Amino acid sequence: MGLSTAAPLWGAPGPLLTIALHLALYLRPAQAWAPVHRDYCVLGAGPAGLQMAYFLQRAGRDYMVFERAPVPGSFFTRYPRHRKLISINKRYTGKTNAEFNLRHDWNSLLSHDPRLLFRHYSDAYYPDANDMVRYLSDFAERLGLHVLYNTTIAHVTVNKDRGAWNGHYFILTDHRGQAYQCSVLLVATGLSVPNQVDFPGSEYVDGYESVSVDPKDFEGQNVLILGRGNSAFETAENIFSVTNFIHMLSRSRVRLSWATHYVGDLRAINNGLLDTYQLKSLDGLLESDLTDLAIVKDHKGKFHITLKLFMEEFFNQSSDAIPLPQDNNDNFAMRVAYDRVIRCLGWKFDFSIFSKSLRLSSGSELSEKYPLVRASYESKGSRGLFILGTASHSVDYRKSAGGFIHGFRYTVRAVHRLLEQRHHGVAWPSTEHPITHLASAIIRRINEASGLYQMFSVLADVVLLKENATTFEYLEEFPMQMLAQLETITGKRARHGLFVINMEYGRNYSGPDKDVFFSDRSVGHMEDAWLSNFLHPVIYYYRHLPTEQEVRFRPAGWPLPRPSALHHVVEDFLTDWTAPVGHILPLRRFLENCLDTDLRSFYAESCFLFALTHQKLPPFCQQGYLRTQGLVGTESLRQHGVESGLLWDSATMGQHQGASDQRPGDHGPGGHPLAPGPPVSPFNSNKEEL
């Protein structure tokens, strides 16, 4: 029988078999490959990732945090190697203001829960890293943040789609092959790849990430440390009491944080080796480019420092035959042999999981260490991709605190506010006030705000003036370099002028070569406020919103373009800018000059006299007195009314109702309110404020 007439090997499939085949052939592959969609994907459950998750959750957004470890803050389970953080935990300030206290709390994340302040997790000024792990775990758990643990994102790419918020979706693939589709990608993975220098003999070097932390392993040894940052000095601090000596080698000079005012430079808690070096106790610091050097291991297992060119010239020679610098110079500083060489060169961003289509780096000076981002923390290569936390530090590298918790908790909030306006139409948070409250609003912020204080010259408050400068709108912690795009980012209008409130150090004060302890380093007189060296408020006034070109080509060293007017609030030893004569009076006069108006507060009698003698009343009188607020019924005021003809004299009224019987809101012939109302000013005096 031919095949054409043969019976089929299988009969027609029944209903159950059809369903089974459908599930096997279609549904299972779809479950394995169809991306799970989230509006927001956050890579990393470290401090920055959790901070962003908090803001997204409070706003009710669709998000997921991906964390490769089983707990949040996994970086702190290993680092710093010697377990002591250099972020301060100042539990007492003498103040009860929570915002002010955050200025000196470098570890807490922002939340509405007062239990989630780091002061409840450690009593130490420099806490143990394990306390940070415990704190971050509680932060994620108590707030119910959506974190997918034990999930390693292995690859990130983009898929163009006109229907997406940013014209494309981000596709994240984890180690199991599961894909996730995101409208916005927020990368908070930090810096996780150790910096290494490739030179002959670099294979003999121990890395900071793996070297022993037991001082006994270094007893009686000669140790060379490559690097000169906090990790290098932290390592030296752990072992310098048991070694023969420690030499530290780097191409750059030591940068002390108290000289540079940069928290990432060498902190005092780690710099004990500087004492032993300067006091000639065998330890020492040297400067040289590591790429010019080479390490030779002799037959005894000791390490010798030579020059790379010697190694290249004697490539095929045994190690004992390779010439050393001391062969020609018997005073060569590193002529001794070393038992250990330790690399402590810091960290850089892991670009390996990101597709080249994302264009995260473009060959700039910092691009090998940090992704290339705009001042808004959005990638220059991919719209909708934002870099958060330590990896976002290229925006303020060596300038402010954006690479550390006490700085990036505020830059993360700024990114969230930008996203709220861009994708959900939620304008940047602001408050509106009468113009008479302008000076007090600024004074309050410069004396309390932690974001301004920590992210100086990066984040600033912005005051938007309304028409005729009768009211103003106050926006907090806006990225200064994005000022030209303020209207797009915030959803606000800046058509009638604006003030920008910023904190700055003196431009020529900080630096590794500066003597920041020179005599007369502080300024005490308000007329010299522009010479202030220490951190102090600076207020810029613009009649019009600066353009992008003006921001881009601003003067060197300036955080903003040249303003229409500029005011420095003189520095204060207590960082308390509330002195009536030294701080408040000059600020108020500056604001008045910019606005061409009188911002003082007045009592009813003075407003009454102004109404009789001036064509234009001060704003305080316009907004209070003329609206039946703040009028105090004194005999002196009544007499003024009688003399001006606005009130009847009670002695001549006979049986008519006197002025003292008038109800609130009654008016005399001249149209001015006469009845007493709630006083606007809390002071009981007939004198104006300063």
Image (cartoon, rainbow, N blue to C red):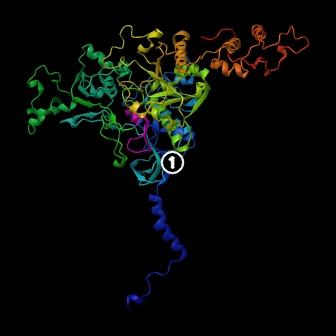
Q: Amino acid at mark 1?
A: Asp
Instruction: Name the quadrant of the N terminus.
Output: bottom left
Snapshot quadrant of residue 340: top left
Q: Which residue is mark 1?
A: 39
> Is there any visible trace of residue 460 in the rendered image?
yes
> Is there any visible trace of residue 244 in the rendered image?
no
The image shows a total of numbered marks equal to 1
Q: Which residues are magenta?
A: 374-394
Snapshot quadrant of residue 201: top left
Residue 140 is left or right of residue 241, and the answer is: right
Question: Of 116 and 641, which appears nearest the observer?
Answer: 641
The location of residue 579, given as percent across then percent down, is 54, 11
Instruction: Name the quadrant of the C terminus.
Output: top right
- How many residues crowd mark 1 within 10 Å: few (<14), some (14–19), many (20+)? some
Would you place residue 527 above or below residue 7 in this image? above
Q: Is 370 contained in the magenta span?
A: no
Outermost residue to the bottom: 1
| Label 1 secondary element | strand
The location of residue 365, given as percent across then percent down, is 30, 34
The location of residue 499, given as percent across then percent down, is 51, 25
The location of residue 459, given as percent across then percent down, is 46, 28
Q: Is 390 contained in the magenta span?
A: yes
Residue 338 is left or right of residue 180, and the answer is: left
Question: Of 656 and 599, which appears nearest the observer?
Answer: 656
